Image: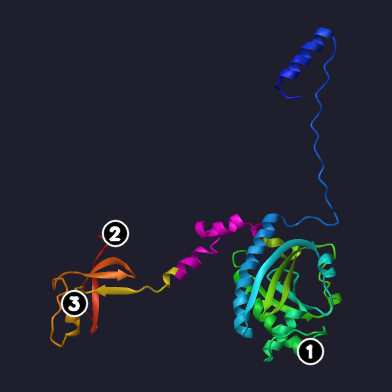
């Protein structure tokens, strides 16, 4: 019963006292039980999956540009989905022949899987060998030469993972093995949970997908960093130094255009057409006046003209805080 009685409870109490009866205790609040599947435990929350989706969305844009230049054809890659699934559920979607790259994601222990749909694999190989990028009408296994070519392009694609993951961890991915039979891809127990990321791929008129299977036990050391608030907050607060130094270095190396304006004047088109050597154009400025120094289109400094090591130069005399 709550500390403060409602009006109906007070009336019921008075009636009970008048009649000599007893007051029935208020029923205890009931807590509804939540179902929990021990065979399929939840390891990734919505925030984790949202962060993973953002990471691979950046990665998709990187490899889209890379594959367009590498294959010399328009390639579109987009992050379609990021969800939690058991490894057995991922295996059940595999149909032989399949292109599975076993990935060592150093410094983490364990193995991740990158699945490339066979339609996209055939088109990539055809383009690399100088073909038009047509998919096969009948599915067949990859030859030894095709496996070598496929492994090379997958290795190039994985080289963009460190940049996409730099806000979470420094990783060095490498392909340890390329499998074309799903039976040899048993890297963890079937009931272990994974983050399954699907990228949709379009090469010309052929569409397919790239699946990344990330076991929880592999990325568990950085699972707390898969938080969008912490991730985006590092850029402004400095965080662990993942963003601030890089942004500062990039800004310091950015080139800007400096322009020293000696003066200006206005003449007619007729005068302009009749200009000849020796003519004098008034610039509206005295010889000893300071020059205006522009940074881009902004007037920022005042300066005196001169010579430095045999070259024309200006010496800054003042800084213009706000344009007059």
Question: Which quadrant of the view contains residue 306?
Answer: bottom left
Badge 3 element: loop
What main secondary structure does the magenta stretch of the protein show? helix
Callout 1: SS: helix
- Could you say which quadrant of the image residue 260 lies in? bottom left
State the residue at coordinates (19%, 69%): 290
Q: Which residues are magenta?
A: 224-250
**Left or right: 293 in relation to 157:** left
Where's the N terminus, which quadrant?
Answer: top right
Few, some or many residues within 10 Å of mark 3 (<14, 14–19, 20+): few
- All told, the count of numbered labels is 3
Return the x and y of residue 157 as percentages of the image width and height: 65, 78
Can residue 112 be found in the magenta stretch? no
Q: Nearer the viewer, residue 205 or 180?
A: 205
Q: Which mark is residue 318?
A: none
Q: Is residue 174 left or right of residue 25?
A: left
Q: Residues within 10 Å of mark 1 (few under 14, many from 20)?
A: few
| Residue wearing tag 3 | 268
Q: Tell me the number on the disc at residue 322.
A: 2
**Location of residue 125 in the rendering, given as x and y in whole percent from the top left corner:** 71, 86
Callout 2: 10 Å neighbours few (<14), some, many (20+)? Answer: few
Mark 1 touching mark 2, by CB under 8 A? no
Q: Quadrant of residue 112?
A: bottom right
**Mark with earlier residue (3, 2):** 3
Disc 3/disc 2 C-alpha distance (Å): 33 Å
Badge 3 or badge 1: first in the primary sequence? 1
Which residue in the structure is indicated by mark 1?
Answer: 144
Label 3 and label 1: CA atoms lie apart by: 76 Å
Q: Nearer the viewer, residue 161 or 291?
A: 291
Q: Nearer the viewer, mark 3 or mark 2?
A: 3
Q: Indicate whether residue 247 is drawn in magenta.
A: yes
């Amino acid at each position: 019963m709550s500390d403060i009685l409602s009006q109906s409870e007070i009336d019921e109490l008075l009636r009970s006292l008048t009649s000599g009866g007893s007051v029935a205790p208020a029923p205890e609040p009931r807590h509804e039980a939540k179902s929990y599947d021990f065979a399929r435990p939840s390891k990734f929350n919505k925030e984790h999956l949202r962060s993973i989706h953002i990471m691979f969305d950046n990665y998709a844009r990187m490899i889209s540009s890379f594959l367009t230049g590498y294959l010399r054809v328009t390639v579109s890659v987009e992050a379609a989905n990021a969800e939690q699934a058991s490894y057995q559920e991922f295996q059940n979607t595999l149909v032989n022949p399949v292109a599975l790259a076993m990935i060592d994601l150093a410094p983490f222990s364990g193995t991740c899987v990158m699945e490339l749909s066979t339609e996209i694999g055939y088109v990539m190989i055809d383009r690399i060998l100088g073909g038009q990028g047509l998919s096969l009408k009948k599915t067949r296994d990859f030859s030894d030469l095709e496996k070598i070519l496929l492994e090379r392009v997958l290795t190039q694609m994985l080289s963009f993972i460190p940049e996409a993951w730099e806000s979470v961890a420094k990783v060095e991915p490498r392909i340890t093995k390329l499998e074309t039979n799903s039976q040899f891809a048993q890297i963890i127990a079937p009931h272990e949970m994974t983050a399954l990321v699907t990228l949709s791929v379009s090469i010309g008129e052929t569409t397919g997908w790239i699946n990344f299977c990330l076991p929880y036990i592999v990325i568990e050391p950085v699972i707390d960093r898969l938080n969008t608030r912490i991730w985006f907050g590092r850029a402004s607060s400095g965080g662990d130094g993942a963003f601030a130094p890089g942004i500062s270095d990039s800004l310091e190396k950015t080139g800007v255009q400096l322009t020293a304006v000696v003066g200006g004047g206005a003449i007619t088109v007729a005068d302009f057409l009749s200009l000849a050597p020796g003519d004098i154009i008034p610039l509206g400025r005295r010889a000893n006046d300071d020059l205006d120094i522009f940074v881009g289109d902004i007037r920022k400094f005042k300066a005196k003209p001169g010579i430095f090591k045999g070259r024309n130069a200006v010496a800054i005399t003042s800084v213009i805080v706000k344009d007059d």
